[in-house]
Amino acid sequence: MAKSKLRADQFVLPHHSDNQANAWSESASKYGNEFLDPFRDSVVNPLLTMLAEIGAEDSAKMTVADLGCGTGPLLPVLIEQFGEVIALDFAAEMLVQCRERIGAEKSAKVQFLNRAMHELDDLADKLDVAVSVNSLVMPDLRVVHKTLKNIFAALRPGGRFLGVVPSVDAIHHHSLMLWDAYLDQGYSMEESERLVSTHMEHHMYNFAFGKFRFGQLDQKFWQPDELKYHLVKSGFTEIRIVRLEYPWDDSLAGYKLLKNHPKTWDWTFEARRPSA
Ligand SMILES: C[S@@+](CC[C@H](N)C(=O)[O-])C[C@H]1O[C@@H](n2cnc3c(N)ncnc32)[C@H](O)[C@@H]1O
């Protein structure tokens, strides 16, 4: 059988007017109701510790970019800490929500860029810190790689890349914990498996490739070793990956049954462009 093989350079890069950007724009006004918030009060977020470790004195002279900033939950922290702040998102409506969240005075201190995350040529060697919170989610690995390489090039030598990625292994863990909890409640094997699949929305996942489809939104979820592999492939060093654990609260399926089970998580990471 003849192999159907597109040339490697024929993949389509994201753009601020493409379907995915429009789908994210459409989700902007209801974002808080539909997505887990890694900055909510009950969560101990290692990303905030990583940012604090940079030190106030140093960061006051630094430029930071929040790549895929969404509605801007991290922006108040970045504005407080860093000298210059860039907020980038390819979904125009996300930037509208961002400005609303932080208000006119703080918005005036931020450079807003409505573009895709790989479009960083004009920022080459300019960023001290790049942040990506649940925005490195492009389902095509070639787009991920192009994006990571361009983030690497946008950082100054020695610059840091910090972020959070959605975890696919945690979806598996959460499902297994819920399965056990239903069996403990006396459900049959068949019924417990059906309940887990329904409540965990397994039909929206492609577990083999770590993909998740929510409405029109296509997202990549990550295994930690896979994330490390792609960061190394893109040139990053000094990679640290740690769990961002979520308490069992009403944003998580079956939380009432899971209070005493090990928590679920996303992955927080830190990486560096090597010093010259
Ligand atoms: C899950 S949301 C996270 C938003 C925000 N960082 C937060 O923590 O709430 C993902 C965001 O990344 C943006 N995004 C996804 N792919 C992008 C790309 N290729 N270029 C620019 N923004 C992108 C989406 O528009 C969306 O605002």
Image: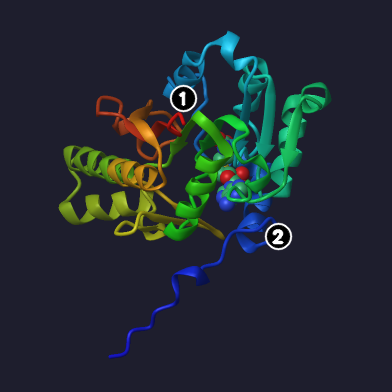
* 8 to the left or right of 198: right
In the image, residue 97 lies at what x, y percent?
Answer: 73, 38
Snapshot quadrant of residue 270? top left
In the image, which disc is placed on residue 17?
Answer: 2
In the image, which disc is placed on residue 47?
Answer: 1
How many neighbours does mark 2 have within 10 angstroms: few (below 14), some (14-19), or many (20 or more)? some
Q: Give me the residue at 29% from left, 31% from top.
A: 258
Locate the N terminus by quadrant.
bottom left
Observer-nearest of 234 and 202:
234
Q: Give me the residue at 65% from left, 32% from top.
A: 72
In the image, residue 226 lies at what x, y percent?
Answer: 31, 47
In the image, residue 246 lies at what x, y percent?
Answer: 39, 28
Observer-nearest of 78 and 101:
78
Residue 194, visible in the rendered structure:
yes
Q: Secondary structure at mark 1?
A: helix
Identify residue type, mark 2. Answer: Ser
In the image, residue 174 lies at what x, y percent?
Answer: 30, 40
Observer-nearest of 262 and 152:
152
How many neighbours does mark 1 have within 10 angstroms: few (below 14), some (14-19), or many (20 or more)? many
Q: Secondary structure at mark 2?
A: loop
Q: Give me the residue at 77% from left, 22% from top.
A: 106
Snapshot quadrant of residue 272? top left
Identify residue type, mark 1. Answer: Leu
View quadrant of ligand 1: top right
Q: Earlier in the sequence, mark 2 or mark 1?
A: 2
